[in-house]
Image (cartoon, coloured by chain):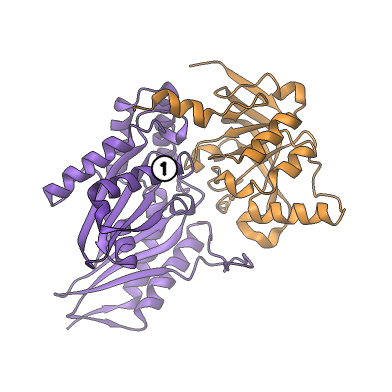
Amino acid sequence: MREISTQIIIDAVKDSATKANFELGDDVVQALKDGIEKEESPVGKDILNQLLENSEIARTERIPMCQDTGLGIIFAEIGQEVSIVGGDFNAALEEGIRQGYEEGFLRKSVCHPFTRKNTGDNTPIIVHLDMVPGDNLKVWVVPKGGGSENMSQLFMLPPAAGWAGVKEKVVETVAQAGPNPCPPTIVGVGIGGNFERSAIMAKKSLLRPLGTPNPDPELGKMEEELLSEINKTGIGPQGLGGRVTSLAVHVQIMPCHIASLPVAINIQCHASRHLEIVF
Amino acid sequence: MDQVIDLKTPLTSEDVEPLRAGDRVTISGTIYTARDAAHRRLIDLLDEGKELPFPVEGQVIYYVGPSPARPGRVIGAAGPTTSYRMDPYAPRLIALGLKGMIGKGKRSEEVKDAMVKHRAVYMAAIGGAGALMARAIKSVRILAYEDLGPEALRELEVENLPAIVVNDTAGNDLYFEGREKYQIE
């Protein structure tokens, strides 16, 4: 068994939480630059330029690119030959988020659903854990804001709806969201599985770097078709009109029950923050 | 690019009436921050017949919950939050003379009607540009509801805070018109 200490996990998660909020990924920066070339609206071009300027200020001055520094969402893949030593694995992930948000001057955005009382330290966090072969531990730190999450949707379609029905729901969800989720967005789509699996696939698809092709060429074609339809809506940057409503659509798919066709649409704002740590 | 209109708070009906959806503006002077939790408390005060922590007439509310300031800084990141969450409360404040709101995203018909009736405008700041927007904020003072943390009611002094008029006093809506212009059937 390979041993990994919880202290190493705490430190790495803390560093990633702050870094993710200060440094927009190179893939998103490139996608915004490409967007300026594609955008026809002068206001839209101007907004994309300001988003690039914003990311530079955040990177150099170490302030968050967006005041909504998000919920602490963590995806983890733990090798079955790994032994976590020195404490509770989930508690270590949570402690990393707690320290990162405090020391990085990030906003604490977690509250009770009804009283709205803030928990004060951005916990609890949300962890999706998979066990895999091998002796690696991979952790993705994914701070995600509320504005784009609020515009996400899940549909349990009748199987007869097929690809046409899925496409309609994806485009409709983006169109109805309009300016609210801070376009240009990245749209994660999870098709199949069941109720919760479709949502997790949609979210996990957002971790794939922009500009990298879907490993499955058939899904790649679906992504292109969905992106093309979405960018016909005219919503544009910040919903003020334009061609670049979304930077990318990412699709994940898996078999589902013979009675079902689940489709989850997770919308991600342009401040797409996620860092992968390999232990 | 069109000319940028400078607005200095407090605003009057005469200041906001010439503004049209799509106009680019910069805002300077004192403005107030409030999100939904603070709005709920403001409405509760009105229901109880009590005075609000700031004079609403002629003022501008910025829908923002900033991130904490690092030592030596005035504020952290401070971009707009999504405005529809304030829709249940906004018409009441507009009727009391609120002249401007800064946020992002669509407003309800009730809010748009109130803006036409009572002469107020809704302006969009760039969502997710919190680091850039913070540069326009020169000072911050917590006025009320400190227990709400990022959602506390704050008084900001701003210089040339950039925004775009979305809803004007004539009932125009840039989100509708902008989209229509670029939509491909």
> Relative to the observer, which residue lies in front, B88 or A258?
A258
User: Residue A77: percent from the left, percent from the top?
Assistant: 24, 70
Residue sitting at 31 percent across and 42 percent down? A28
User: Residue B109: percent from the left, percent from the top?
Assistant: 62, 38
Give the residue type that dot 1 points to.
Thr
Within 10 angstroms of label 1, few (less than 14), some, or many (20 or more) residues?
A: few
Residue sitting at 59 percent across and 65 percent down? A118
Residue A218 position (above or below residue B178): below
Question: Which quadrant, please, contains the C terminus of chain A?
Answer: bottom left
- Chain letter for purple, please: A
Report whether B115 appears left or right of A99.
right
Check disc 1 and report the residue beneath it.
A60
Q: Is residue B29 visible?
A: no
State the count of labels.
1
Residue sitting at 51 percent across and 43 percent down? B130
- Chain letter for orange, please: B
User: Residue A150: percent from the left, percent from the top?
Assistant: 47, 53
Q: At numbered mark 1, what does the secondary structure look like: helix, strand or loop?
A: helix
Report whether A103 appears left or right of B168.
left
> Relative to the observer, which residue lies in front, A40 or B136?
A40
